[in-house]
């Protein structure tokens, strides 16, 4: 049996997405991001921004531009999504009516910002689905920004919605929503990993995602020039908080995030050795370098290979056979 079948017979199989979600809001940056994705391959997603990252006052023309970029021939890998305005904004319905009918076939996902409850997410899903489905009849995946008190209070119910694929933490808005009760130092490192209220929010989002087999996406790093800061934030988000994806707000951040969230070669080689031996033993328990392994640890090492598959790594032949 294939590992993806035998290892998840009694469990919800995890979702896998590229580890970096790059946001771009101006035409210049959107086109630059698409060109970079063509160069590097689908190792990162692009989110074309109609909301906070875009200029105000020209919403209709911007939505038309986004629709043309998503549906155009330069979208080689169909790994481009869009962040629309929030549910209560006058341009929300306009974004949907312009972008979805034109671009649904090639659109990777829709991002919903500033929701307050699971009821608001359900209302937004209903309106999204009225405007478009993918060519095969499937629903467009939706990513939800958790950046308000209300959304955090209902984060497990939001993660449980079948159409929701990913939850992202909106650090800046979350801190701002406390009106000075959380200091500005918590909007950057190391404070964002140390302040109890911020850390609690990150952990609750990640836990909700993993409970329902969804992707937790970490917030932005405002540091642009120092790539070591970006990479360190990505590693801490993964190792300390369980995040498997992270936002980028500048093209120079992309490679740092992809590199930090891609498994190292040593772990990939270890995964190949353990899974190859397990497959030879019909996925029963094995002994490897003096340690016992069974399906619980096989699931871990299988996810290592799946994550590596989305990164800038040339996988060994044995890994490709397992995948």
Image (cartoon, rainbow, N blue to C red):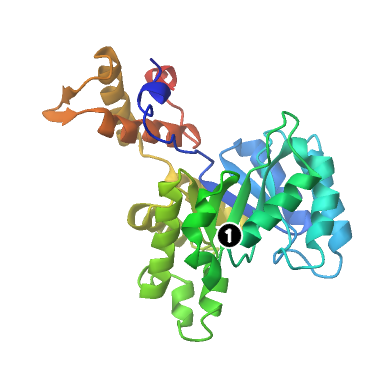
Residue 266 lies, with reference to residue 128, above or below; the image says above
Between 266 and 184, the residue placed more toward the observer is: 184
Q: Residues within 10 Å of mark 1 (few under 14, many from 20)?
A: many
Figure quadrant of the N terminus: top left
> Going 52% across and 72% down the picture, which residue do you hit?
149
> With 29 as the anchor, is 304 left or right in this view?
left
Q: In what element is the residue under mark 1?
A: helix
- Horizontal and vertical percent position of residue 51: 72, 63
- Horizontal and vertical percent position of residue 3: 38, 22
Residue 2 lies, with reference to residue 109, above or below; the image says above
Figure quadrant of the C terminus: top left
Between 130 and 73, the residue placed more toward the observer is: 130
Extreme-left residue of the structure: 290
Q: Quadrant of residue 25?
A: bottom right
> Going 30% across and 16% down the picture, which residue do you hit?
279
> With 295 as the anchor, is 86 left or right in this view?
right
Extreme-front residue of the structure: 119
> Going 60% across and 38% down the picture, which residue do you hit?
40
Q: Quadrant of residue 133?
A: top right
- Horizontal and vertical percent position of residue 94: 84, 58
> Going 62% across and 64% down the picture, which residue do you hit?
115
Which residue has dot 1 on it? Answer: 118
Circle count: 1
Between 13 and 265, the residue placed more toward the observer is: 13
Residue 15 visible? The answer is yes
């Amino acid at each position: 049996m294939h590992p993806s079948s035998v290892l998840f017979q009694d469990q919800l199989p995890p979702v896998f997405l590229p580890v970096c979600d790059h946001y771009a809001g101006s035409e210049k940056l959107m086109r630059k991001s698409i060109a970079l994705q063509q160069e590097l391959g689908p190792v990162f997603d692009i989110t074309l921004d109609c909301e906070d990252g875009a200029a105000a006052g020209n919403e209709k023309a911007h939505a038309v531009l986004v629709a043309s970029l998503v549906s155009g021939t330069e979208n080689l890998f169909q790994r481009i999504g869009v962040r629309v305005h929030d549910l209560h904004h006058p341009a929300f319905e306009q974004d949907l009516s312009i972008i979805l009918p034109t671009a649904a076939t090639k659109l990777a996902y829709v991002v919903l910002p500033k929701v307050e409850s699971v009821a608001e997410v359900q209302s937004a899903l209903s309106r999204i689905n009225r405007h478009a489905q993918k060519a095969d009849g499937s629903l467009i995946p939706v990513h939800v920004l958790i950046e308000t008190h209300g959304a955090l209070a209902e984060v497990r119910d939001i993660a449980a919605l079948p159409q929701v694929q990913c939850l992202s933490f909106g650090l800046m808005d979350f801190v701002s929503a406390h009106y000075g009760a959380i200091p500005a130092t918590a909007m950057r490192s190391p404070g964002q990993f140390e302040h109890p209220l911020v850390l609690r929010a990150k952990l609750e989002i990640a836990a909700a995602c993993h409970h329902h087999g969804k992707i937790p996406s970490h917030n932005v790093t405002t540091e642009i020039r120092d790539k070591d800061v970006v990479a360190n934030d990505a590693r801490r988000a993964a190792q300390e908080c369980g995040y498997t994806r992270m936002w980028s707000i500048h093209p120079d951040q992309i490679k740092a995030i992809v590199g930090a969230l891609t498994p190292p070669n040593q772990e990939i080689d270890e995964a190949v050795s353990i899974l190859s031996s397990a497959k030879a033993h019909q996925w029963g328990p094995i002994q490897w370098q003096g340690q016992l392994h069974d399906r619980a640890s096989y699931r871990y090492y299988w996810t290592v290979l799946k994550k590596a598959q989305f990164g800038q790594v040339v996988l060994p032949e044995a890994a490709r056979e397992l995948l």
